[in-house]
């Protein structure tokens, strides 16, 4: 059974940093691209970032480019999102997501989400 | 970046109704489109990918169609458990944008 368990969310002041983690199990982790998707309170889904299975190909939304860094540790089956220079508008539930196989593939499994609140 | 526009944003319907949601892309995306369902407080779930392929375990009352820039999600006979918010997502290129969502509520 595929499981994705996020951690690391919390309350942080504007300008601060947080590191989200996602522990994966139930599938061959290094075979699949992984993504982060967020949802601000009462708003829709926003794709944030993705990383290829090997960890070298990374992609970012314009809204987070230069501030967030996605990475993965395939030996530990863990995905990370380093979030720096946080802004109030980064407040959201952050979902870890597993992509299906192939470049044009959808998310087929989601974590339960971890909340991030950026406020002074 | 590719923009996706869903219509309508809100839909009120009754159990048994046929419901259609449209997703338009700002440029051609072949058939690289997925649909997700999200219920309050829950993570989204994949319904359809490659515009028209039903994800395993999804009821056959859900169907998708389209190619290029215009896509539709149809629920042939709305069931009580289908009241939720639906999102399209383009998988043609990065960034992988979502539509703004369509909330389906009980009439």
Image: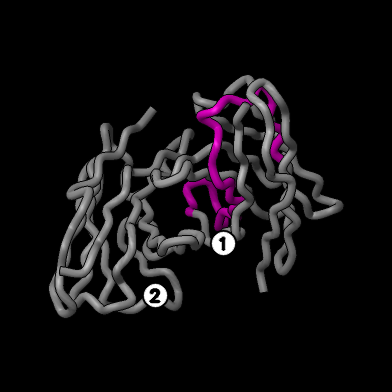
Query: Could you say whether the residue bearing mark 2 is in a helix, strand or loop?
Result: loop
Question: What residue does disc 2 label?
Answer: B58
Task: Look at mark 1 in the image and give the residue it sits on.
Answer: A109
**Image coordinates for residue B53, horizontal then vertical, percent:** 36, 65
Q: Position of residue A16 (x, y in %)?
A: 71, 25
How far apart, in angstroms, are the residues tagged by discs 2 and 1? 14 Å
Q: In which quarter of the image is residue A52?
A: top right
The residue lying at 59 percent from left, 53 percent from top is: A97
Seen at 26% across and 79% down, the residue is B79
Residue A116 placement, left or right of B9: right
Residue positioned 16% across, 79% down in the render: B16
Helix, strand or loop at label 1? It is strand
The chain identifier of the residue carrying mark 1 reads A
| Other-residue count near label 1 (Cα within 10 Å), few / some / many at <14 / 14–19 / ≥20 | some
The image shows residue B67 at horizontal and vertical percentages of 25, 49
Q: Which of A16 and B53 is in front in this view?
A: A16
The extreme right residue here reads A75
Span of residues in magenta = A81-106
Label 2: how many residues lie within 10 Å, few (<14), some (14-19) or many (20+)? few
Along the line of sight, the residue nearer the viewer: B57 or A4: A4
State yes or no: residue A6 in magenta.
no
Q: Which residue is situated farthest in the front direction here? A: A120
Task: Inspect this view and state whether residue A54 appears.
Answer: no
Q: Is residue A104 visible?
A: yes
């Amino acid at each position: 059974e595929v499981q994705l368990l996020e951690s690391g969310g919390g309350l942080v002041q504007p300008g601060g940093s947080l590191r989200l983690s996602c522990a994966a199990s139930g599938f061959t982790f290094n075979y699949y691209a992984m993504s982060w998707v967020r949802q601000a309170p009462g708003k829709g889904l926003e794709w944030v970032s993705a990383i290829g299975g090997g960890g070298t190909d990374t992609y970012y939304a314009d809204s987070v480019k230069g501030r967030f860094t996605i990475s993965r540790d395939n030996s530990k089956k863990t995905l990370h999102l380093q979030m720096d220079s946080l802004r109030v508008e980064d407040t959201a539930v952050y979902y870890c997501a597993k992509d299906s196989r192939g470049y044009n593939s959808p998310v087929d499994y989601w974590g339960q989400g971890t909340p991030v609140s950026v406020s002074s | 970046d590719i923009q996706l526009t869903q219509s309508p944003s809100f839909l009120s319907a009754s159990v048994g109704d046929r419901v259609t949601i449209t997703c338009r892309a700002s440029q051609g995306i072949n058939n690289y489109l997925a649909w997700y369902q999200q219920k309050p407080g829950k993570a989204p779930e994949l319904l359809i990918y490659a515009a028209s392929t039903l994800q395993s375990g999804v009821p056959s009352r859900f169907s998708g169609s389209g190619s290029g820039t215009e896509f539709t999600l149809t629920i042939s006979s709305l069931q009580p458990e289908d009241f939720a918010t639906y999102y399209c997502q383009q998988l043609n290129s990065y960034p992988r944008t979502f539509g703004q969502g369509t909330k389906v509520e009980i009439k």
